[in-house]
Image (tube, rainbow, N blue to C red):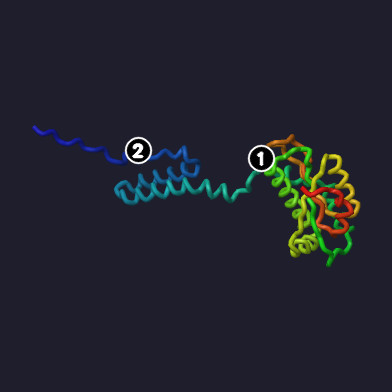
């Protein structure tokens, strides 16, 4: 006698989904909630398999996308590496004293309209940084200067950027000389930005690497850095 084929169990029994259904716990709370709603709907629509399949698909889609949408809309928290990068580029961070100093320097510059401007990058050679490291530190210095000027002297920034943004890299032999140059530049109300390295590669954390001076009148900057050699 030919045995009768075993009858498969119904896909839905007592309002529960089959065991092959994906578990929502691994996909986050939104998917869990959506799946619970789906089970309720599926239990009430037990005889409509098409509707149930659509509900499961919608629940999966909601659980997959909602966490990404929430993460995108919520304010981002900076990682420790991002904070170190800010420190590396910002010369120690923004403080009230530094803001006051930048504002005083901007107010004391007078009118440089129509004058030829340039910016110099004073790079320490005693640290023996590799070329790529030097380029990165110079980039931090220029970005820092532009950020400061955008806030405290946008007119000077526009005048410099509209005239080819002249930049020159110079050699500095020590940290002491770097600080002396910064003090001299500040006496003439020239913009300055000192880069403090975060110490992730090649050199020790807290090392002063590059000093940006300017943009400012060429003759004024030459009176401070004219004795330095080109990098």
Q: 185 or 37, which lies in front?
A: 185
The residue under the point 78% across, 64% down is 159
Q: Is residue 124 left or right of residue 59?
A: right
Report whether 84 appears left or right of 40. right
Q: Which mark is residue 38?
A: none
Camera-side mark, 1 or 2: 1
| Residue under pointer 2 | 20
Q: Residue furthest bottom?
A: 114
Occupied quadrant, residue 85: top right
Disc on the earlier residue, 1 or 2: 2
Q: Nearer the viewer, residue 134 or 27?
A: 134
Q: Nearer the viewer, residue 222 or 104?
A: 222
Residue under pointer 1: 81
SS at mark 1?
helix
- Residue 143 is at least partly visible in this image: yes
Q: Which residue is at 76% across, 38% downward?
A: 127
> Vertical placement of 3 versus 76: above or below?
above
Asked whether disc 1 touches disc 2, contact meaning CB atoms under 8 Å apart, the reply is no
Question: Looking at the rendering, which quadrant does residue 113 occupy?
Answer: bottom right
Q: Position of residue 172 (x, y in %)?
A: 82, 44
């Amino acid at each position: 006698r030919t045995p009768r084929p075993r009858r498969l169990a119904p896909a839905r029994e007592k309002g529960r989904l089959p065991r092959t259904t994906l578990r929502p716990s691994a996909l986050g709370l939104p998917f869990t909630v959506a799946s619970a709603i789906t089970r309720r709907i599926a239990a009430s629509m037990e005889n409509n398999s098409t509707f149930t399949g659509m509900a499961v698909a919608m629940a999966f889609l909601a659980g997959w996308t909602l966490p990404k949408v929430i993460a995108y809309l919520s304010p981002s928290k900076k990682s420790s590496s991002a904070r170190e990068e800010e420190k590396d580029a910002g010369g120690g961070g923004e403080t009230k004293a530094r803001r006051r100093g930048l504002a005083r320097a901007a107010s004391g510059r007078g009118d440089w309209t129509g004058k030829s401007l340039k910016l110099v990058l004073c790079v320490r050679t005693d640290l023996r940084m590799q070329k790529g490291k030097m380029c990165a530190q110079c980039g931090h210095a220029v970005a820092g200067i532009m950020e400061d000027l955008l806030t405290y002297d946008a007119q000077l920034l526009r005048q410099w950027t509209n005239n080819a943004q002249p930049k020159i890299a110079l050699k500095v032999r020590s940290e002491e000389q770097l600080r002396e140059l910064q003090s001299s530049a500040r006496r003439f109300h020239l913009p300055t930005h000192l880069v403090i390295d975060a110490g992730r590669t090649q050199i020790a954390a807290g090392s002063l690497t590059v000093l940006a001076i300017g943009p400012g009148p060429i003759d004024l900057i030459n009176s401070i850095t004219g004795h330095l050699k080109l990098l």
